[in-house]
Image (cartoon, rainbow, N blue to C red):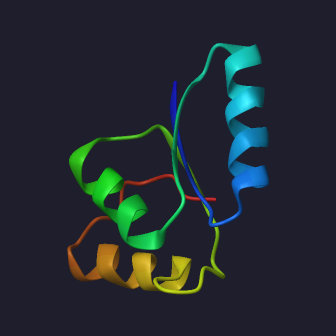
Amino acid sequence: MDLLAVDDHADTNEAVNDYCKTRGIGCKVASQGRQGLFEMQKRDYDLILLDIAMPDYSGFDILKQLKKQGVRHKRIV
């Protein structure tokens, strides 16, 4: 399983990454919304953990962009 965590808080990203390591889950973290969107577009992740309240490019912005692109198969929490 491959997971993408998109959150602007380093502590949250570190906790998710550490948890994934203990469970043998591949984990990529993105600390900015645009970086997270780029990761979603270049690779198909099994699960995406998305912070909706990031300062520059929020999770809502990412969801709107994915909808414009017709992307509906992503599992986003």
Quarter residue 59 falls in: bottom right
- Does 39 appear above or below 60? above
Which residue is at 52% across, 84% downward?
Answer: 60
x and y, in percent, of residue 39 in the image: 33, 51
Task: Assign the C terminus to one quadrant of the image.
Answer: bottom right
x and y, in percent, of residue 45 in the image: 41, 40
- Does 66 appear above or below 26? below
Which residue is at 60% across, 79% downward?
Answer: 54
Quarter residue 70 falls in: bottom left
Q: Nearer the viewer, residue 66 or 35?
A: 35
Report how many numbered discs are placed on residues in the image.
Answer: 0
Q: Nearer the viewer, residue 17 or 60?
A: 17
x and y, in percent, of residue 26 in the image: 53, 24
x and y, in percent, of residue 5 in the image: 58, 50
In the visual, does 77 lie left or right of 57?
Answer: right
Which residue is at 28% across, 65% downward?
Answer: 71
- Does 49 appear above or below 2? below
Q: Nearer the viewer, residue 1 or 26?
A: 26
Which residue is at 64% across, 13% downward?
Answer: 24
- Does 37 appear above or below 57? above
- Furthest residue in direction front, as rendered: 10
